[in-house]
Each structure stands twice: as C-alpha cells, then as structure tokens.
Image (cartoon, rainbow, N blue to C red):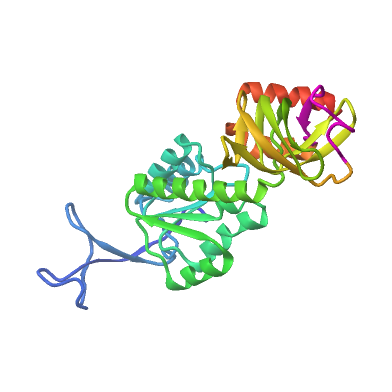
Amino acid sequence: MNGPIVTVIRALLTPQPLKELRIKNEYIHHKSIKACIGVKISANGLEEVLCGTSLFVANNKEDIDDYKNKVMTDVSDVFSHVDKSGVGLYVMASTLGSLEALLIFLNDSKIPVFAVNIGTVQKKDVKKASIMREKGRPEYSVILAFDVKIDPEAEKEAQTLGVEIMQKDIIYHLFDAFTAYSQKIEEEKKKNKITEAIFPCELAIINDCVFNKKDPIIMGVKIVSGILKIGTPLYIPEKNLKIGNVVSLEINKKSCDKAKKGEEVCIKLAGEPHVIYGRHFDNTQKIYSKITRESIDVLKEYFRNELAMEDWRLVVQLKKIFNIT
C-alpha cells in the first residue's frame, strides 16, 4: 500500500517432498527454480506485500524504475474504483484480484467505497471504518470482508465502535447482506423522522358529518388530494387558523394510519381547545396540512418514494399558500 517494494532475494525455499506442510519440517534451499513449482521467497521488507500484485526480477538497475511503474499500474487500476468524496464502505479482500472484482461489482451497483485493504480484518481497519460515524454517515460504517478472516480483537473493537463487519466468500452474498442492512437502517431512519414528516393534503369537510364541534373535533372529511396521516397538523389559510392535529383516522369504522386521495374518513382533531366548528370555521373552507420547510426536506430525503408526482405538485402549491421559500 505504501508503494513498490524493491529487495534482494536471500533464499528460495520449497518444502520437503511428500511431507505434510502443517508439520514443521526443514525447507530445501535452492539457488534457482524453474517452472512449475510453488516456492517460498525469503527477503527483507516483504511484510507489507499485497497478495495478487505482480513480481518482477530485475537483471540490472536500469530496469528497476520501469518495473516499479508496472507494479503500481496494477494497484492504480484497483484504486480508480475508490470514491474520491471520502464517503462510503470499507472493503477488504484476500488478494488484489478479488478486491478489484468486488470493487467493480460495487461500483456497478452504485455503492461507494472510501477505503480498501487486503488481508485479515484488524483492529486498525475497524477504527478506520468507524470514521463514517464521525462524518454523520453511520449507514456506511461497514466493513465488507470478502474471503478473509477477522481478528478476534477486531470483532471486539467493532462492537465497541458500532462498526458492522460482513464476512462472506461469495460477492453476491456480500452484496445481499449489505442491501438487507441498508434497508434496515433506512427503515430505522424513517421511524425516527416520521414525527417530523408532514405529508401534503387538501381536505373538504363532508356536510352533516360533524359529530363533535370542539376539542376533540370529530368529523368526516374527503381527501381532495395528497395523503392524510395521523399526527398531521391541519390549517385553514383563509382564516389563518390552525384547527388541530389529527390523532386518529377511521374508514368504515376501522382504524387506519393514513388515507389517500378520493377516500372519505372520520378524523379526530385535538390540540386547539379554543377552536369550535360553526363559530371559527365551517364546511365551506378548504383545509390543508400545515407543512414547513423542515418537513419538506425530511420528505425529500426519507419519504420521496411514498409521494407521487401529483403529491409533489401539491407541495409546491402549499409552499405558495404558506409562503415557504
């Protein structure tokens, strides 16, 4: 990761023939090796060698710079898939080739990656991945570990720092795990923001369907446009009057959480004890949800898919009614 490694081979080693590699045996030393055989190379400065990078033998000093550039070309190709914004996942793999394959897949899937590494997941990797929480992007405080082991100390550190480590040996399984995690995080965000989200709606009071005229006001309404949800503050711009917050909804005597355009529902309003139907407002006035700049921002960020184009046009209309910039 710190650049090309130039060193001198001290020894070329192969295991004893017909010996179990897991049992410690003396290696055989060679002056030279020909294909095809696996060989262990002993040399200084190999501690940070990346698995999967190219190995070149320079017969003279003039070739060294050329080989340095060739080695770094492999690494540069991999790093070209890392997001320059500094926001994204932390990705680890067993070799440079498998890392590149995973990065290409994530890039095609529009999933950003802010840093990469090769080998066993260590404590330092977890600390680096936790930076996403400091940046206010906890959904990206994740390490995707492809075909690598996880150090026990790293697992403990991940629990302490709130870093999610996903370990799989198949790229698609890793992608599925992160997708499921992202959906879970998104749902949690929505739950936390639901009280701040005011959905746009326009209501018309149904004549002869007012069952209680003062707090709590109970009456039947028709959803002219938009979406009406529990908790929505209702307002009559014509009178510059807030008539209350929706505390319950019923359709055909059955409780529900929301109602859409064209539906007729019975609503209960509370929170404005001085407002009385017939004295302060009646069925001739239009009722709207009292949206704010903050609620519009929340809708755009967390609930965009729940609103149709017609609903967004109503948002634009309400911005004009309530003078929202």
Q: Quadrant of the C terminus?
A: top right
Q: Is residue 190 magenta?
A: no
Q: Nearer the viewer, residue 273 or 235?
A: 273
Question: Hey, which quadrant is residue 22 in on the image?
Answer: bottom left
Total marks placed: 0
- Vertical placement of residue 14 versus 94, above or below: below
106 sits left or right of 292 in the view: left
Q: Position of residue 157 (x, y in %)?
A: 53, 70
Name the residue rendered at 66%, 45% in the picture: 194
Residue 283 drawn in magenta: yes
Residue 7, located in which quarter of the rendered image?
bottom left
Most frequent secondary structure within the magenta stretch: loop
- Where residue 258 appears, as percent x and y from the top left, is 61, 37
Figure check: 317 above or below 109 = above
Q: Report the residue at 50% width, 59% height from top.
A: 164
> Where does residue 235 sit, x and y in percent of width and height?
81, 33
Task: Please name whichever residue, 276 or 308, is drawn nearer the observer in this view of the structure.
Answer: 276
Instruction: Where is residue 32? Give x, y as percent.
Output: 22, 60
Please provide the residue range marked out in magenta.
275-292
- Could one spot residue 302 in this view of the protein? no
Is any atom of residue 188 visible in this view? yes
The answer to whether 126 is drawn above or below residue 199 in the figure is below
**Among all residues in the image, which is located at the extreme left?**
18
Residue at position x 21%, y 59% in the image: 38
Q: Nearer the viewer, residue 280 or 260?
A: 280
Q: Is residue 13 left or right of residue 206?
A: left
